[in-house]
Image (tube, grey):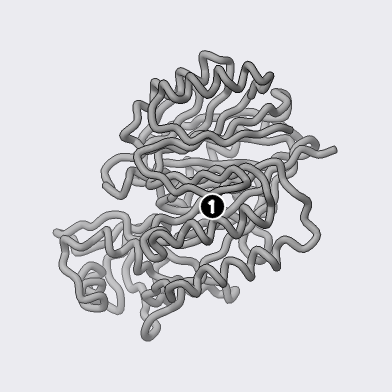
Amino acid sequence: MNTKTLLIRQVINLEQQLAELSEKEFNPTLAIVFSSPVLPLTELVKTLVDRQIAVVGASSCGEIFGDVERVQIADSAAVIMLLDIDPTAFKVYFKEGTNGDCFLLGSETAKLTLDGFEKQSLIVLASGMKTDGQALVEGMVEVLGSQIPIFGGLAGDDAVFKETWVFCNNHFSNQGVVVLSLDQSKIEVTGMATSGWISLGADLKVTSSVGNVVYHIDGQPALDMYMKYLSVLEDDLPGVGVEYPLMIKRSDGETAQRAVMAVDKEARSLVFAGSVPENSIVNFSSSPGFEVIEFTRKNIEAFDQGNHRPDCCLLFSCMARHLALGPLISDEVHIALKKWQAPLAGFFTYGEIGTNPNHQCDFYNQTFTIALVKQKD
């Protein structure tokens, strides 16, 4: 399977590059698009669809481009992974979100895919501001089982925290889900998620929460607790809360971060990217700095034992990693590019979907989550 990554700053650039690729007899059937919302998304997608290219994508909080030799971190741009994949090896699904029940949204989305392949892998993109990522994933797992490979992320909007978009072909939504289903008999998808964030301070207890809204921590209003622990003002949230998420300690020994996505000043509550169960034991957490890069390197080396070179890589990296590492984020991406030597496209997200060390699908914040896509022989 041939693949090609494009970095686009204007739609006219996409038209030119597609024409050049056609002259070289590269005619992709699928495009995976991660774009800043400042670009004209409908025009961008139409350019691809008019060439009979199926499209799935999301708005982003920064774009990640890799073409084997170099990494480029962009903003106000679009990165596009083009694949000349067999059209019978993939299906695209769209589900509009309406009532705020993200578990139901996940289960209904998963049910759409049941009429597809006997065994499938999924790339899932969902709204970043109106989706409880944990509930969405749990709804999908309820229908499909926990062992199905699912990777993806929550859409971003350049850290404005106002409105995000997902899209496929002619469907656009600021509260829906798009899914790329790949036939496991023809396409192999593997991947990993790694964080490196460390806990800060003592254990705390979530004493009041509903879904992804936390009202009280240790009996105190959640917003006030954040302000106290981080020594910040109300107006510093949710921005600073992305860098200092809650770390949930689960009963199986695993941990998961939850980044702040919105603030309710009247209720003194915080809205997180994923569910934070009542009575959860949590810490505040933070990046240890550049040690995160070495942590990623070690986890990639451990994961890669016995894996084959993929045809392309899809990267879903939390926007907090970009904030924490600054320009050195490209060094972290280059580790993956050097290891797998395949075209890479990705974006900085408001939440990531991937597999945990127990090989089960999970929802994250603060992770470097990568999916490796390879056509089977």
Residue at far right of view: 377
Residue at far front of view: 69
Quadrant of the image containing the N terminus? top right
Quadrant of the image containing the C terminus? top right
4 with respect to 102 (left or right): right
Task: State the image coordinates of residue 183 (x, y, percent, origin top left).
Answer: 73, 35
Residue at far top of view: 50
Task: State the image coordinates of residue 56 (x, y, percent, origin top left).
Answer: 52, 31
Is 192 located above or below residue 130 in the figure?
Answer: below
Q: Please report the residue visible at 53 percent of the width from the left and 61 percent of the height from the top.
A: 332
212 with respect to 30 (left or right): left
Task: State the image coordinates of residue 223 (x, y, percent, origin top left).
Answer: 22, 67
Q: Quadrant of residue 237?
A: bottom left
Q: Amino acid at mark 1?
A: Ile
Q: Please report the residue visible at 58 percent of the width from the left and 15 percent of the height from the top.
A: 52
For label 1, the residue is 353
136 with respect to 42 (left or right): right
Is 261 located above or below residue 44 in the figure?
Answer: below
Is 366 located above or below residue 290 in the figure?
Answer: above
Q: Please report the residue visible at 21 percent of the width from the left and 72 percent of the height from the top.
A: 227
Is disc 1 surrounded by few (<14), some (14 to 19) or many (20+) residues within 10 Å? many
Foreground pick, 157 / 265: 157
Q: Please report the residue visible at 75 percent of the width from the left and 49 percent of the height from the top.
A: 309
Foreground pick, 140 / 369: 369
Residue 49 visible? The answer is yes
Task: State the image coordinates of residue 220 (x, y, percent, origin top left).
Answer: 23, 76
Helix, strand or loop at label 1? It is: strand
